[in-house]
Amino acid sequence: MSADFQNWTTSCQARIETFLEARLPAIDCVPERLHKAMRYSVLGGGKRVRPLLSFAAGELAGANVERVTTVAAAVELIHAYSLVHDDLPCMDDDILRRGKPTCHIEFDEATALLTGDSLQTLAFEIMAEKRLTDEPQTQLEMIAQLAFASGSRGMAGGQAFDLESIGKTLSLPELEYMHIHKTGALIRAAVMLGARCGNRLNNDHLAKLDHFAKCVGLAFQVVDDLLDAEATTATLGKTAGKDAENNKPTYVSILGISEARELAQKLQYDADQALNSFDDGASRLRQVTDFIIKRKF
C-alpha cells in the first residue's frame, strides 16, 4: 500500500468515524442501553471498505466530500445493522465480531435485534435530512436505491438464500446469484451513491461504474471465503472456519483454494477493465479494489 493511499484511507476512515460519532445517539440519551449498543456495534472497528468505495467514486464524479460522507455513513450503518443481525443465534450464531463480543453477547438478543433495526432506520434518516445532490428527484432515487439494495431483492434476500443453502451443494452460478445480493448489493450501492453525489458522469459511465461495482462485490466475497478458510480467529477478529463448520457453500468449497484465488484475480481484472473509459480520476477506485483483493483480515 503506497503512502499516498494509506494517508487517503486514514483520512476517509477518520472522516466517517467522526460523522458517525456525532450522529449516533449519545449513551446518556434514553433508552441508554439501546444507544450504548448502537455505538458499540458501529464505532471503533472495521476497515470501512464500503465508505472507502463511496469516497473513491465521489472523487471520480467530482462530488462534494460532505455529501459523500453522508451517503458513506448511511451505507456503513446498513452494513453494521446487517452484521448485528447476522451474528444472532437465529442466523449465524457467532460470538465474536471485529475482535470483541458480538452485540447479543455483550448485551442480549432483544437489544441486538433492536440495535439492528435502529441502525437501519438511522441510515435512511440521515439520507433524508441532508442535501446529497442539487436535484431533489435524484436524491429520492438515491434513497430508493439504498432501500432496494438493503431489502428482499438485495442484501436481506441474499441472506435468506444463504440460510436456505446450508447443507446443500450449489452450482457456481447459484453461488454467484446469492452473493450478488447478500454481499454485492450494498457494495454496488456504496459505489453508485458516492458517484451520484457528483455531476460528471453520464448514463454510459454510470453503467460501467455499476459493472465495476458488481465485480468488486463478488471479488470481496471470494476473498472473504478464502480468509475464512485460511486465516485465524485472532487475525480475522471473528470466528474463523465458521462456513465449513456450518456446512455452508462457499467459493472455496466449490472451487478449492487455488481456483478461488484465480477467480478473485479475474474479477479484479474485469473490474479494472470497466474503468478503462475513465481518466486518472478512477485511480482511487483501482487502489481500493487492490486493497480489497489483498487484504489479510
Image (spheres, rainbow, N blue to C red):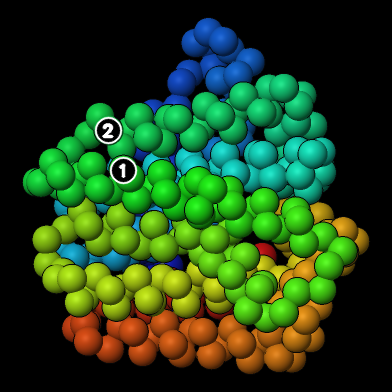
Please give the count of numbered marks on the rendered protein: 2
The image quadrant where one finds the C terminus is: bottom right
Q: Which residue is mark 1?
A: 143
SS state under label 2: helix
Q: Amino acid at mark 1?
A: Ile
Residue 9 screen position, x and y as percent? 41, 62
- Residue 69 seen in this snapshot: no
Left or right of residue 122, residue 71 in this image = left
Q: Quadrant of residue 234?
A: bottom right
Residue 242 screen position, x and y as percent? 83, 59
Q: Which residue is mark 2?
A: 128
Residue 270 screen position, x and y as percent? 44, 87
Residue most toward the left? Answer: 134
In this picture, is 254 found above or below 157?
below
User: Which of the marked residues, 2 or 1, is nearer the chain's N terminus?
Assistant: 2
Check if mark 2's residue and mark 1's residue have beta carbons within 8 Å.
yes
In this picture, is 235 found above or below 251?
above
Q: Quadrant of residue 31?
A: top right
SS state under label 1: helix
| Crowding near the residue tagged with mark 1, few <14, some 14–19, many ≥20 C-alpha atoms within 10 Å | some
Left or right of residue 281, residue 85 in this image = right
